[in-house]
Image: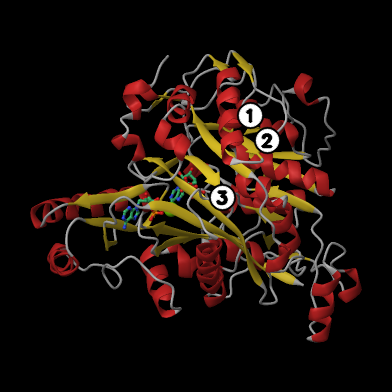
Amino acid sequence: MTCFTFVETFSLKVRKSNLSAFRNSFVHRFKVLPYKETCRNAFSSWRLEYGSQSNFSVPSTSLATEQHIVSSSSSALKEKLVEKGQKYKVKPIKKVLVANRGEIAVRIIRSCREMGIETVAIYSTADRNALHVALADETVCIGEPSSKKSYLDITSVLAAAEITGADAVHPGYGFLSENSVFSSSCEEMGVTFIGPSPFAIDKMGDKSTAKETMLNAGVPCVPGSNGILSDAEEAVRIAENIGYPVLLKATAGGGGRGIKLARNSEELRSLYQMCSAEAQAAFGNGKLYLEKFVEAPRHVEIQVFADKYGNAIHLGERDCSIQRRNQKLVEEAPCPVMTEELRAKMGEAAVNAAKAINYCGAGTVEFLLSAAGEFYFMEMNTRIQVEHPITEQITGIDIVQLQLQIAEGRPLPYRQSDINLKGHAIEVRVNCEEPKDNFRPVPGQVSSLFVPGGLGIRWDSHIYPGYTIAPNYDSMIGKLIVWGPTRDQAIRKMKRALNEMNIVGVPSTIPLHRAIFNNEKFIQGKEIYTNFIETEDILSQVVG
Ligand code: ADP
Ligand code: ADP
Ligand code: MG
């Protein structure tokens, strides 16, 4: 038996969705109290009163023995593991609480449904009409629109898992996905966290510590400070040693935020306090580290997967060099300048990085690749990545499904030699932003929507005609993904899809993507660096 003590009293608001027309086509079961229109705040409220002294118990699920395992494992791998005399502890997952919203929540629910696993959607009051709520088997409202009062509120998320009897939590990306307090609380409650151990999250979550860990593991890193800077003067001393320009980076930063460029000591001194204060406000941690600014690199990242038994492989790379303000706009796989030799080297470095921290599950090791072919570790994201679909398209592997299998305790069903990359995939991130107004997010109602189709086209999104995009969250409204046998064919397909796509009611970054896909340098593919949008002056070419 695992015991968990809630230290506070909390209430949960539970309701039945009012999307009846839309959701009638899906199978839904509600263990929770029905929504009552007349109720105060339009919610029926369910108080779970666990006083500070009282415990409740979660029965531990019996662990299966070896014969339950690995129906999908390759027989060679099974033999290898049996030879080693290893026993696997497999705990099949029956019901997943999706601790996220938007397209990634929809993405996770889809894989669960295909695997016969039940799903629980959590949502804030701003997300009553969200697609992930309509698609899940059960739904729990966990709080107000502000992320802090809903999707980031650990107590409410855990309570939702408890009342619905979810035996696993998938954190998606962003929100609590890289929060080790959350992942360890799940485990303490007897709920499987679909991700790595709290130890691995901590080792990589702090970007400066991650670099130290990687240097010790022999993974090449961008030159810079050894750990956290104590003050601006230390930053200047190090910058003078390694040479300007340098980047000040928030150790807790993410999503392209918390990075500032300094070209000389004056700039560095004046940016230091501002950067630290901004990081404190945005990430609750003002600590900074310093890195040499690599001029004109490509962003190339490796998708890794590891199981609980020490096996680790990579699924090739993704090139995410098309960025604006350090945020990815377009991603493709494979990288157009990759060679078999470089892939083997980068793949090995990424697998070593994972092994160095006993990693388990899906992770991404991000590198900068210089024009001379040298690569440097930047950070590791210990979660599923926004751009994971392009890897799925070229490997044929459902990454969410594999995450679930690994979390159940199954060994990796592939060896490195089983991974074959086929064709070329490209993803564009579609945001409800106005490219001509400095990418100002413009949420609102999607009055009509036409999504392209045809061979090799995939649209991962949570929007639908009539849906009102909430202003409280990320402005990404979908990802358009194409696959073709060659890069050239994938580009043609994307151009065709971008021309067909029609989102009415809110502005989107589709016109920006059309401009990118009309650019000769992009089409040629060999000389793309992270400064592409600026050097090619793409913004001036956006039409419509
Ligand atoms: P990926 O690396 O998967 O491409 P991004 O870096 O674009 O993903 O981030 C994915 C999502 O997670 C974005 O919504 C981003 O805002 C959010 N995110 C990433 N890191 C952090 C962080 N440290 N704090 C808050 N949000 C973050
Ligand atoms: P985040 O956690 O926000 O994803 P990263 O450390 O991964 O931050 O960096 C985001 C982007 O910033 C990279 O993809 C790259 O374009 C740019 N960048 C980061 N570090 C460097 C560097 N040392 N030199 C040049 N560009 C960098
Ligand atoms: Mg990154």
Question: Mark 3 belongs to which amino acid?
Answer: Pro
CA distance for labels 3 and 2: 30 Å
Residue position marked by numbered label 2 in the rendering: 132
Residue appearing at x 59%, y 58% in the figure? 316
Residue appearing at x 67%, y 54% in the figure? 169
Residue 51 screen position, x and y as percent:
62, 59
Query: Observer-nearest residue: 72 or 487?
Result: 487
Q: Residue 128 bears which disc, if any?
A: 1
Residue 248 position (above or below residue 417) = above
* Count of numbered circles on the image: 3
Left/right placement of residue 399 relative to residue 322 reads right
Q: Quadrant of the N terminus?
A: bottom right
Query: Observer-nearest residue: 520 or 129?
Result: 520
Of mark 1 and mark 3, the one earlier in the sequence is 1
Residue 240 position (above or below residue 396) = below
Question: Mark 1 belongs to which amino acid?
Answer: Arg
Residue position marked by numbered label 3 in the rendering: 334
